């Protein structure tokens, strides 16, 4: 870094290293944090000056621009939009729609993020790239979210991304950062000497240095206060007041021109001069402004510092602000930029005006179509304030609350709903408020509160929107299931179904029958519902239907009740694929856990770990908590007691189903550890529950058989008689017969599970049979099954069960060396996931799209995979063991 930036050698050296590493292909990110005027922008300028051989692109947040979705991101990407055609179609469509260049389905911020990552990587393939973002605290939320997403994925790109922040930005938290501190006394005095003209009393000089606390902008501005004395107060406010004092003596027309420039966030000189003409400003109002050094007029209008803009705008009267915004609205083309025109009109309006409110509502619709949910909510709130008719105002507030909920701003949505409820009475709107409150309660994991709200909303919506009422009732049932609430009475109140029934109707009918009529009576309904859901063709636009179509709230529950592992796993895979395609990250978290649960049962611990880690990565990016229920089964298989603490907290939080899952996995844990009395007790705590009543049956029988509770084993066998016959259920039934004393059941259990994808159950079947044979004195036969069990259980990531097999082997006289798990030859979870997708034939861009990383990063990971597995090509990867 050049030595001419006073007192910044350390910062300069760190930024030099950042450029060197980015040039070599190791993507770099740095957030420069510090108070206003501390010199952060000067550091950006020096990065730009030192970036020889790099292409440089810059953007800056502007406070007045923060209402417009993707405004900051567009600044950064606009030099590269001629490359949009090189992006994969879904990414091209998402980014084009976000930037208003094309009409398409509402893009998610994560698909836009992937598109931006791919676009920047495409540029960096030709020439290393530096992206500089100033005043990131004022970026719009969508730009912040996307750039935070990109910043966390610059692993193998020739890209350096540097942000400047004055205050916090949640989307950038956790990124590498450098706190820019004030200059030391010697450097501060040197800077002060460079700007003071003429002699200054030493005491005054010392006070300026002390008051400035090493802030370079303060050192440049505070000397102007010397004549009036140095006032106490926050430093930023005093610097701003220094600028105000420089503005106050200017002619009125000059001050109005400065105010117009401050109110026009784009820095568009053409718009500025048109507005100046409309305001009737004098012949050359800019001359005096330029003379102050506070502003530059060119193709773009630029203030010397963001504090100058805020000083100009805040010091102006309300009447002058409205006058300026009215002029800017009048010169903004409604056909080319209707949103900015509507915003200026709103800033110029103080009394209710339906025309202006309608324009803002249209702006909100366009923002929502581009994926800017928080922006849409803000425009709708502003529209509501300007709406004369109380009922229409409440409708717009409700729409704003929905947008906030969809954007994840749950508490803000609830606060707004209180304002909606203060509006004029309206039965439909009241039902919709209750519906939204139920959704938010579910989102916040307050499922016990969600269920009654959703049931009530479903009843009230029936006369207005029967289809929405049925869907709401299904959501309510799901909430009640997860709360562990009594279901029978609620299930009977389902709204009438359509004729002919659709998939939703059949799923609702199946669950209702299962809850109210019992297992056997519901089998025909569950069979038909599964057939219908399998046949449904859905796309990413149907993301809101995924929980009841494929997820572990409805469709997945029915597949489990029908002991259909293949369909259960296929539903989970489809839910993950669709959620990824839509970029619906919260839905994806639930889908990842459902699929991880299936992968664990299938004996694929590395695949499950990759999915669990993805849930955690999404949580870090979005701020939503990880779903994490799959980790309970994973921990039980590993012999780790996570269930006790999770179950206790779940009960305290009213999450009955999570507590049930904890008890089920606790029974697995203790069976693995040989603590069969604890396994029995945990299994007995599982209440009569959809899915888990079935799943816990074999755990209870195994534990009871070892504790001498023959009656419990017999009850378990009796319970299984009603189950439909599939490879999964037949394997469990045969196991139960074996535990009841019919040795042939153990052999049949192995045969049934061998025809399924349930490797964990097959391994346990070998273990149980081997243990029985050993107890019967058939040591040679026992060894074969116990060796198989030990190898399979080790590979399945079930060390405590594998230890059980090893102890039994030793009891037969086995002397072979004990094997330990060597999962995927040291592949990380993400490497394993990439290797599997590559083996399945997906290209690097396709893998990147699925995992939200760039193709170059995929290639970087694959090189490591090839080295670890000792292969040199994708063809060889197909035959590699991992």
Image (cartoon, rainbow, N blue to C red):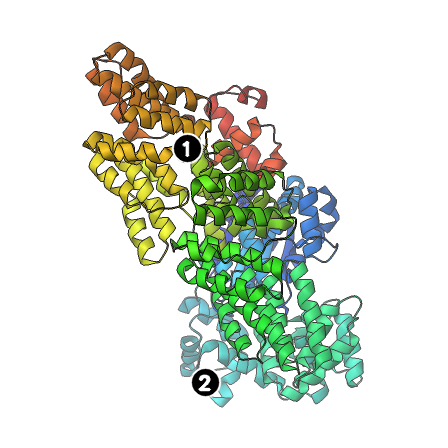
The residue lying at 21 percent from left, 18 percent from top is 775
Helix or strand or loop: what does disc 1 sit on? helix
The residue lying at 46 percent from left, 51 percent from top is 619
Q: Measuring from the top left, give residue 251's x and y in whole percent.
A: 69, 88
The residue lying at 62 percent from left, 81 percent from top is 390
Taking depth in this image into account, of 102 and 297 the one nearest to the observer is 102
Q: Is residue 788 above or below residue 823?
A: above
On residue 230, the disc is: 2
- In the rendered image, which residue does mark 1 sit on? 601
Which is more foreground, mark 2 or mark 1?
1
Q: Measuring from the top left, give residue 255's x and y in whole percent.
A: 68, 84
Q: In the rendered image, is residue 458 in sight?
A: yes
- Left or right: residue 868 compared with residue 281: left
Q: Measuring from the top left, give residue 230's x and y in whole percent.
A: 45, 85
- Left or right: residue 163 compared with residue 351: left
- Left or right: residue 67 compared with residue 563: right
Q: CA distance from mark 2 to mark 1?
A: 72 Å
Residue 42: quadrant of the picture: bottom right
Count neighbours of disc 1 (C-alpha within 10 A) and say few if under 14, some if 14 to 19, many if 20 or more.
Answer: many
Count neighbours of disc 2 (C-alpha within 10 A) and say few if under 14, some if 14 to 19, many if 20 or more.
Answer: some
Q: Is residue 782 above or below residue 705?
A: above
Q: In the rendered image, is residue 611 in sight?
A: no
Residue 707: quadrant of the picture: top left
Q: Measuring from the top left, give residue 708's x and y in whole percent.
A: 19, 31
Name the N-terminal-most of marks 2 and 1.
2
Q: Is residue 148 above or below residue 427?
A: above
Helix or strand or loop: what does disc 2 sit on? loop
């Amino acid at each position: 870094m050049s030595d001419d930036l006073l007192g910044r050698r350390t910062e300069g050296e760190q930024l030099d290293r950042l450029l060197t590493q980015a040039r070599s292909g190791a993507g770099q990110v740095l957030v420069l944090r510090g108070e206003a005027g501390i010199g952060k922008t000067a550091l950006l300028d020096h990065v730009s000056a030192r970036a020889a051989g790099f292409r440089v692109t810059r953007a800056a947040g502007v406070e007045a621009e923060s209402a417009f979705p993707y405004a900051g991101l567009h600044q950064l990407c606009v030099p590269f939009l001629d490359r949009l055609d090189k992006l994969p179609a879904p990414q091209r469509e998402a980014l084009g729609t976000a930037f208003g260049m094309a009409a398409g389905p509402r893009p998610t911020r994560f698909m836009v993020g992937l598109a931006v990552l791919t676009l920047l990587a495409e540029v960096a393939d030709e020439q290393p790239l530096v992206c500089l973002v100033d005043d990131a605290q004022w970026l719009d939320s969508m730009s912040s979210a996307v750039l935070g997403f990109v910043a966390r994925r610059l692993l193998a790109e020739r890209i350096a991304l540097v942000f400047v922040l004055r205050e916090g930005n949640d989307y950038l938290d956790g990124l590498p950062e450098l706190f820019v501190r004030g200059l030391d006394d010697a450097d501060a005095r040197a800077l002060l000497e460079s700007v003071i003209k003429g002699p200054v009393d030493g005491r005054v000089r010392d006070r300026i240095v002390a008051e400035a606390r090493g802030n370079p902008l303060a050192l440049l501005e505070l000397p102007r206060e010397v004549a009036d004395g140095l006032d106490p107060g926050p430093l930023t406010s005093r610097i701003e007041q220094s600028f105000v004092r420089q503005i106050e003596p200017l002619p009125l027309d000059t001050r109005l021109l400065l105010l117009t420039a401050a109110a026009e966030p784009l820095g568009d000189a053409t718009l500025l001069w048109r507005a100046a003409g409309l305001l009737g400003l004098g012949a050359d109002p800019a001359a005096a402004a330029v003379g102050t050094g506070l502003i530059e007029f060119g193709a773009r209008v630029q203030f010397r510092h963001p504090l100058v803009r805020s000083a100009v705008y805040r010091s102006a009267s309300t009447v002058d602000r409205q006058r300026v915004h009215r002029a800017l609205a009048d010169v903004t083309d409604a056909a080319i930029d209707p949103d900015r025109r509507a915003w200026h009109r709103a800033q110029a309006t103080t009394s209710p005006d339906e025309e202006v409110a309608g324009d803002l509502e249209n702006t909100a619709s366009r923002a929502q179509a581009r994926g800017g949910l928080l922006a849409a909510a803000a425009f709708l709130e502003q529209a509501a304030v300007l709406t004369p008719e109380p009922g229409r105002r409440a409708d717009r507030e409700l729409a704003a609350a929905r947008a906030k909920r969809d954007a994840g701003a749950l508490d803000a949505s609830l606060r707004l709903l209180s304002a909606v409820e203060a509006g004029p009475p309206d039965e439909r709107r009241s039902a919709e408020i209750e519906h939204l409150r139920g959704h938010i309660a579910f989102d916040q994991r307050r499922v016990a509160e969600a269920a009654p709200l959703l049931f009530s909303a479903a009843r009230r919506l029936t006369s207005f929107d029967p289809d929405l009422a049925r869907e709401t009732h299904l959501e309510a049932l799901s909430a009640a299931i997860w709360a562990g609430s009594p279901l029978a009475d609620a299930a009977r109140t389902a709204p009438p179904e359509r004729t002919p029934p659709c998939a939703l109707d059949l799923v609702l009918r199946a669950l209702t029958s299962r809850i109210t009529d019992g297992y056997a009576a519901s089998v025909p309904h569950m069979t038909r519902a599964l057939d219908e859901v399998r046949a449904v063709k859905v796309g990413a636009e149907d993301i809101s239907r995924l929980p009841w179509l494929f997820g572990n709230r409805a469709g997945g529950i029915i597949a489990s009740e029908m002991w259909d592992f293949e369909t259960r796993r296929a539903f989970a895979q489809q839910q993950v694929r669709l959620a990824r395609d839509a970029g619906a990250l919260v839905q994806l978290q639930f889908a990842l856990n459902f699929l991880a649960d299936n992968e664990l049962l299938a004996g694929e611990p590395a695949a499950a770990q990759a999915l669990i880690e993805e849930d955690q990565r999404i949580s870090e990016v979005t701020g939503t908590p990880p779903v994490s229920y799959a980790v309970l089964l994973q921990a039980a298989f590993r012999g780790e007691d996570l269930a006790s603490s999770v179950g206790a907290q779940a009960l305290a939080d009213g999450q009955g189903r999570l507590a049930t899952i904890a008890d089920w996995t606790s029974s697995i844990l203790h069976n693995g550890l040989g603590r069969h009395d604890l396994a029995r007790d945990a299994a007995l705590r599982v209440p009569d529950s959809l899915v888990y009543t079935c799943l816990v049956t074999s755990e209870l029988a195994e534990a009871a058989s070892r504790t001498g509770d023959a009656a419990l084993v017999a009850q378990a066998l009796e319970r299984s008689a009603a189950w439909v016959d599939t490879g999964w259920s037949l394997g469990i039934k045969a196991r139960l017969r074996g535990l009841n004393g019919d040795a042939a059941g153990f052999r049949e259990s192995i045969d049934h599970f061998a025809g399924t994808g349930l490797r964990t159950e097959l391994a346990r079947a070998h273990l149980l049979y081997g243990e029985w044979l050993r107890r019967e004195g058939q040591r040679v036969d026992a060894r074969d099954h116990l060796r198989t069990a030990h190898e399979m259980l080790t590979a399945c990531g079930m060390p405590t069960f594998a230890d059980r097999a090893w102890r039994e082997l030793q009891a037969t006289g086995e002397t072979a060396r004990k094997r330990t798990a060597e999962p995927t030859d040291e592949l990380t979870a993400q490497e394993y996931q990439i290797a599997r997708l590559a083996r399945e034939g997906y290209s690097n861009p396709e893998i990147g799209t699925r995992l939200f990383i760039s193709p170059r990063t995929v290639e970087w990971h694959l090189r490591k995979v090839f080295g670890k597995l000792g292969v040199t090509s994708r063809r060889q990867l197909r035959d590699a063991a991992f």
